Image (tube, coloured by chain):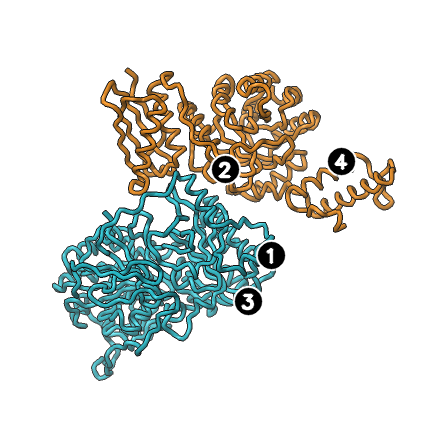
Amino acid sequence: MSGRGSAQRLERNAAGRQVPVRVNGEPAIPFAGVGKHKPSGRRAAPPLATAADHPADGNKLVPTLKAALKKVGLKNGMTVTTHHHFRNGDLVANRLFDAAAELGVKNLRWAPSASFPCHAPIIRHLDAGVVHHIEGSMNGPLGDYTSEGKMRGMAVLRSHGGRYQAIQDGELHVDVAVIAAPTADPFGNANGLHGPSACGGLGFAVADAEYADRVVVVTDNLVPFPCVPWQINGNRVDAVVEMEKIGDPSQIVSGTTQITRSPDRLLIAELTAKFIAASGILKNGFSFQAGAGGTALAFAIYLKEMMKERGIRARFIRGGSTKYLVEMLEEGLTDYILDGQTFDLAGVRSMGENPRHVNTTPFTSYNYHGKGMFATMVDAVVLGATEVDVAFNANVVTHSDGRLLHGIGGWQNCLFSGCTILAVPSFRDRIPVVVDEVTTLCGPSELIDVIVTERGIAINPRRKDLRRAVRGSGLPVRPIEEIREEVDRLVGGSPAKARTGRKVVAAIKWVDGTVIDCVRQVL
Amino acid sequence: MPQSAEAGRRGPDVRSDCWVRVTPKRSGGRKISVKSKVESMYGEAIRAQAEEGLEVLGVAHATVDVEDAGALPFVLMARLETAARRAYGLEVAEPWLPEAIPASRRPGEKERFRRSRLYLPGNEPKFALNAGLHGADGIILDLEDSVAPAEKDAARILVRNALRTLDFGAAERMVRINQLPLGFDDLDAVIPENVHLVLIPKCESPQHVEDVDAKIRRIKGEGGRRVYLMPIIESALGVLCAFEIATASVNVVALTIGLEDYTADIGTQRTEEGLESRWARSMVVNAARAAGIAPIDSVYSDVANEDGLRRSVVEAKQLGFEGKGCIHPGQIRVIHEAFAPSEEEIDKATRIVTAFEDADAKGLAVVALGSKMIDPPVVRRAHRTVDHALRAGLLAKDWREAQ
């Protein structure tokens, strides 16, 4: 990998943002507009293998992770991946880099589907050069480390769908995938449904299993063949490692998911549900997606009440699933839950026993370089954001001070729904959320339809249909500039611009692999 | 030499507030040091604002330390002014006022809904910021029981600034002052800020009302906007004087009851069933109705118990109350729903009002609905129900045409 320290050449992309044209030495395409960049060529593929090289008894067990890494030939400069279904309870990624360090391997590229504060120990491996840079998400200590320009390479942030796309397109070649599996057999069949570290689905590891040159499954619940259902197919697995403990269950799923008690957030949630009803989206056979954040959960509960009152049944709900979505499924308010990740124990149980609670993957839901994706078929989605601007652009990765704060997650992919609603407070503490111009662009205005704040609802001028639909509903629809001005007055003027240097520390990818924006080193 | 003094709060759990210490010096000018959660975005703004404030407050030489957890400018101003006043006492003559927003000048109304009134602790900024968004009929900035005795001065300044800066929407702007004579100082601070209504706590005699009324007149000057009064009956003696209190001033528009203090005063405890206070509540309703003003019930304090609140409002409505206090925005909707007339009630009321108007147009003295004669009080109640339904948006303005 090259590009270290050399001056970065920037180009203005279609969204007007200056972006690097090389990322870690590889050429990168500036964002060309939504749907404008057309890929060509063929999908990537792992090397062919033969059953002749694998044990006939199906036993691929290797005693330790270190031995497995040695077996699959981990070398300097390789790309290794992990998934984030264990969220802040993951124990495997840290063990993986400890083992890599023991093997004396350097300059690895780590491409997790997301990282969490529990991965702070990896900073040691970044400092020591075991890990060269991260492509995934950065928050907490890793976010600060990256923002302060300490990482050797440039970070790359992708959405869940963008990660699948990048791996599939060969843009992100995975040498070794390490898949933490709550249940697995010695052949490598694995699922997330059972075992002490049960997390529901394993959708985020599907691209890794399918496209990586080498695949290692790590489990703390080894069962004799066959492990069913096999969310991860053992035919793609090189080695299986049994470990005492792969996750901290208390951090993987919560026993109970908490709804917000903040009156302001409840107000935002209620306004959002009322908007969905007033706009005519709420009708038999409709679909929606809402995450597990406090406001999104409260929204789902308000919506549920409206559905019950009006006798409306959804065709499907997209998860992140929680007990609230499970209740809607079990009360017959939706035909299906199409679930990307499972946030609580009720979700895990339901996915395990209810055939209408369906495990989905970033391929089916979010991959932009496919023959369609589920995300465009969702009628309405409710998301958060760290900033939205008066042009309806939004930021989800950095704080207004320029620091990396969140990964993109499925956020960019969800923007393709029929009606994309950002449900956000107009300011947090003193920091405005509705701003003149977003610090970092993650979502372009043409895909963001509605901003719901506690101070009113702003509808993107492009969506004249939505404006017409809610006219006369009594909802507090206001121009976004008016909300911004009110917030500005309250907080005492716009904040000082983030103090950043020239160095680009992270590239923000769009769902098609182009670069939509970048993040500079904070000073 | 004045002593160092501090104001506000700091610590990991503090939000939307700040802590300020002013240490007077003999010379050396002003030294301001700021630690802020929003340093990179507002650090400079905070320093500039502190500098400006010290100038206005006449502090030439001092060390000022600020620890900020995202306080809005009006909060920072209040904390700095409080710390300066504590340090310099009477040497600080002028207040340091934030600009008053146009919405803060909206006049009050005598006749209006007072179904829900939301109590906000006067020394806690974070609850006040968005309080106007939740649809309460009234918002009470409380200087009394929710404020610790040592923080009365701080709360007074913060409430004053909040009244100038925050948009409370259509809500009636209310302040609960302290018991007299401390309450007089509260009035000095808040009455110039367009308070619509003052709640007088522990009211036991018409004299309390007259004293408050006179003090407000002195502050406002003759010809100023009227400030309405809502005495709170909170003792056995208060209940016995309820009618005299209700009629002590033309500015008294509502009478309410505080049950925690009342039950303690009569030597018992408050229960969910409320048997112990039934008589007192009825007395308050009776006194208010006799005086032609609105009877308003106490707060329901179990925030998590929505069903309990609903039952309590239904009971209050049955006793004759028109409103209820709340301590969480989540209670507002329940209160409004429970006080609202039912569809049947509205339907019946509109038919009676229509019959009355028909009879009136024909010059008939007797109102009849079908074969039934309608008594004047029933007509009055029907008018009240229609009015309530109109204001709560449960009845279209053009309902007469739809009939």
Q: Earlier in the sequence, mark 2 or mark 4?
A: 2
Q: Is residue A215 left or right of residue A446?
A: left
Viewer-side label of 4, 1: 4
Find the distance from the CA under tag 4 to the CA under tag 1.
34 Å
Q: Say which residue label 3 marks.
A: A285
Q: Colour of chain A?
A: cyan
Instruction: Indicate the amino acid at tag 2.
Output: Asp
Q: Earlier in the sequence, mark 1 or mark 3?
A: 3
Q: Say which residue label 2 marks.
A: B167
State if disc 1 and disc 4 touch (CB < 8 Å).
no
Q: Chain of mark 4?
A: B
Viewer-side label of 2, 1: 2
Q: Colour of chain B?
A: orange
Residue A309 numbered tag: 1
Number of residues whose C-alpha sits closer than 10 Å to that of mark 2, classed few (under 14), some (14–19) or many (20 or more) = many
Q: Quadrant of residue B380?
A: top right
Q: Residue at x 78, y 37 (%)?
A: B378
Viewer-side label of 1, 3: 3
Instruction: Indicate the amino acid at tag 1.
Output: Glu
Instruction: Indicate the amino acid at tag 4.
Output: Arg
State if disc 3 and disc 1 touch (CB < 8 Å).
no
Find the distance from the CA under tag 2 to the CA under tag 4.
35 Å
Find the distance from the CA under tag 2 to the CA under tag 1.
34 Å
Find the distance from the CA under tag 1 to the CA under tag 3.
16 Å
State if disc 4 and disc 3 touch (CB < 8 Å).
no
Viewer-side label of 2, 3: 2
Residue A458 in picture, x, y percent from top left: 49, 52
Instruction: Indicate the amino acid at tag 3.
Output: Gly
Q: Chain of mark 1?
A: A
